[in-house]
Structure formats: structure tokens, C-alpha cells
Image (cartoon, grey):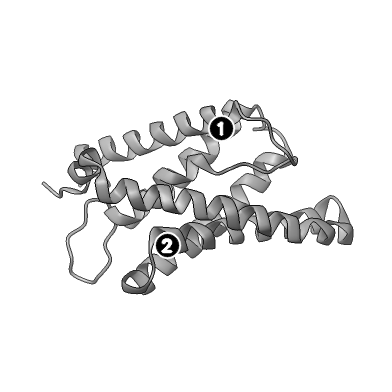
Amino acid sequence: MPMFSEKQINRIAMLGALSLFLSTVEYLFPRPIPFMRLGLANIPVILCLDLLPSEKGRESVLPTLAYFLLILLKVLGQGIINGTMASYVFLFSLAGSFASGVMMYLAWRFLKRNITFVGISILGALISNMAQIILSIAFIFGSTAWRILPLFLGIGLVSGCIMGIFAQRFSEKSLWWNKMRDIK
């Protein structure tokens, strides 16, 4: 029995391609601070949560494994686009993406009735920033990295809010997205 159906593979591929496209668009914008991105490539990851099972026994469009595969595709795609595959920046991105992905998944799974994509996105942005700060303290800059924490968290809060608002509005108004959510 295959791990994913053909329809599920197509959905993962579509979300992965959308994430790659948004990552490419984001690469065109100048970064005010090294390592900081707006997080456009996270929009498909946030939206993907809506395709996962939220209750026991409920049929879902995608299995949970697909969500983490999408995060891996996003990180690999960004590494290729940015040319950072063989650097510590890739490892920071990998750690931040998976840390935020796990927290966003847990929040969506257990707080779905009480949290929107805005809250999920803000949580993901802040967790990603914290993971990257911790790595920079441990491996590169030492304790001086704490100095940029308020700025990182402030930017993460703003960008998480913007990405969350976009994801929320898109999920509510997009006909294409409603078709993606169909189980059939």
C-alpha cells in the first residue's frame, strides 16, 4: 500500500511548488537584517494545517506526515534558491522551520477551536526566531546574540501577523483553496 495517494502527492507537490515560488519572490526583497525573511514561503505550510486530521476518526485530505514533508521541501527549496545548502544558514533554517512546524501543528491540533491562522503564524514565527537565536548563541555568536532577540521577536511578531492574516483571508475566500480541501 503506497504511503500517499496520487491525489495527495499532487497536493503536496502543489503546496511545495507554491512555497518555492513564494520563497523566490521573497528572495527579491532586500533584507534589513541578515537572516530575517518576511516568511512568504510559510503561507503554504500554514494553510496545509487545514488539510490535516483535526479529530480522531475524521477523514482528512492529507496525512500528518505530508505536513512535515512539505516543511522539508520548503527548507530544501529555500536552500537551493538562496544558495545556502552547504552553510550554517541552511541548518538554522532547518531547525527554525521544524521547530515552528512542530509547534504550529501542536497548536492547530489541540487548540483548533480557539486559534486562527493568525495565532498559528505568530506562534510559528516566534518559535522559529527563538530556535535560530539559540543556535546562534550555541554555535556562532555566543551570549552576544541575546542582544538581537527583542528585534528578532518584534520582526517575527509583525511578519507572523501579516502572513497569518493573509493565510486566514485566503483560506476563507479562495475558491481554489476550497477545492484543495475537498477530500474526494
- Percent position (x, y) of residue 173? 25, 46
**Numbered badge on residue 159:** none
At x 23%, y 72%, the residue is 56
60 up-or-down from 180: above or below: below
What residue type is disc 1 on? Answer: Glu
SS for callout 1: helix
Which tag is nearer the camera, tag 1 or tag 2? 1
- Percent position (x, y) of residue 49? 35, 55
- Percent position (x, y) of residue 89? 70, 40
Of residues 43 and 15, the one drawn nearer to the viewer in this rendering: 43
At x 58%, y 26%, the residue is 81
At x 70%, y 42%, the residue is 35
Pointer 2 residue: 105
Q: CA distance from mark 1 to mark 2?
A: 24 Å
Q: Residues within 10 Å of mark 1 (few under 14, many from 20)?
A: some
SS for callout 2: helix
- Percent position (x, y) of residue 149? 76, 60
What residue type is disc 2 on? Answer: Tyr
Look at the numbered discs 1 and 2 and tell me whether their residues touch, using CB distance below 8 Å: no
Pointer 1 residue: 26
From the viewer's perspective, tell me whether residue 145 is left or right of residue 45.
right
Q: Could you tell me if residue 128 is visible in this image?
A: no
110 up-or-down from 156: above or below: below
From the viewer's perspective, tell me whether residue 59 is left or right of residue 26.
left
- Of the residues under marks 1 and 2, which one precedes in the sequence? 1
Q: Residues within 10 Å of mark 2 (few under 14, many from 20)?
A: many
Q: Could you tell me if residue 154 is visible in this image?
A: yes
